Image (cartoon, grey):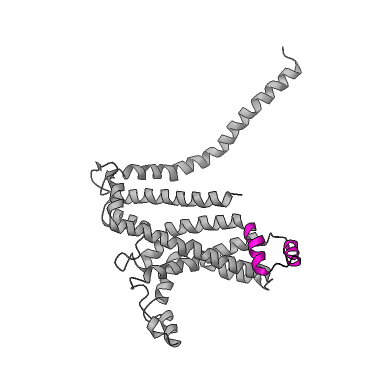
Amino acid sequence: MSDGTTTVGRSATRRPARSGWVAWAYLAPALLIYGAFLLFPLGRAAQYSLFEWDGLGESTFVGLDNYVEILYDERLREAFWHALVLVFFYAVLPLAIGLVLAALLTRSQVRGLGFFRSVIFLPQVIAMVVVAVTWRQIYAPDGPLNGFLRLIGLDSLTRPWLGDYTFTLPAVGLIGTWVCTGLVTVLLMAGMSRVPRELYEAARLDGSGPVREFFAITLPTVRGEITVALTLTIVAALKTFDLVYVTTSGGPGTSTTVPSYEIYRRAFQLGDVGVATAVGIVLTIIVFAINGVVNMIGDRK
């Protein structure tokens, strides 16, 4: 027979173990769904990347040859380079524009701020296919952009924007800038709205101007929001497919091909599933690596 102190001690010892099982029981459904719809397909893709397979017939084990082909295939190397260029248009440029817009809208106490926030965020709620079709009309040789340039006497700048080897990739990238700027601006405005106005008043008493206030107070405060914005926009840039598919289909030539489009082309048009999945695995690793670096820098105090 045990006394009361011993009983209480045993209950306290058993409680953490029981609560651990209860926590795993709550997590189990989510973990099962995550494993079934994300980890299992990812594992199968890694398996397929080691085979030469057309998707229907017999497969042949080739080891890492599909990954070696990525290094030697000029078209695939160009695709990865184009994806990195799009990171500038999808992430860096929207961040610069978003910081300025968010600072102006937050500090100047604009009337109807909710309306402006909705207008800026609007591109995020429009389907990318609709965005692509709309911008394809804008960039057309007889479209509104060239019409505006002719109207102001800049006929020499008119060109088929989605058919020019030099300007097509920046033209596609600017569509990404238009789409991502709203998301970045809204995130930064949410962060800037938390900054106490007393900090700005104290800075003004010390003789600080708007630029110094921005770099000394505003920018450090929204560091977390900048990290989130860069993570989301970099992922959007590296996995973009629908925009390229609808506007240029990778052309002219290979000037706008990207890894996601190459995955589709290799798997469903050329029947080269092994190389397609290898491209997908490499793209996944690059996404994790870049965002890991961004989050590590963002978390650094």
| Horizontal side, residue 187 vs residue 56: left or right | right
Boundaries of the magenta span: 192-220
Q: Which quadrant of the structure image shows residue 158? A: bottom left
Quick one: 72 or 188, which is closer to the camera?
Answer: 72
Q: Residue 292 in magenta? A: no
Residue at image point 48% right, 67% down: 177
Quick one: 244 or 70, which is closer to the camera?
Answer: 70
Q: Which quadrant of the structure image shows residue 149? A: bottom left
Magenta stretch: dominant secondary structure: helix
| Residue 125 visible | no
Quick one: 113 or 217, which is closer to the camera?
Answer: 217
Q: Position of residue 236 (x, y in %)?
A: 46, 58
Q: Position of residue 267 (x, y in %)?
A: 30, 53
Q: Residue 216 in magenta? A: yes
| Residue 172 visible | yes
Asked if residue 206 is positioned above or below residue 26 in the image, the reply reads below
Q: Position of residue 71 (x, y in %)?
A: 30, 51
Count every numbered label the image shows and give the total. 0
Furthest residue in direction front, as rendered: 207
Residue at image point 45% right, 65% down: 128
Residue at image point 75% right, 19% down: 5
Residue at image point 62% right, 32% down: 19
Q: Which quadrant of the structure image shows residue 48? A: top left
Quadrant (top left, top right, bottom left, bottom right) of the N terminus: top right
Q: Position of residue 142 (x, y in %)?
A: 37, 82
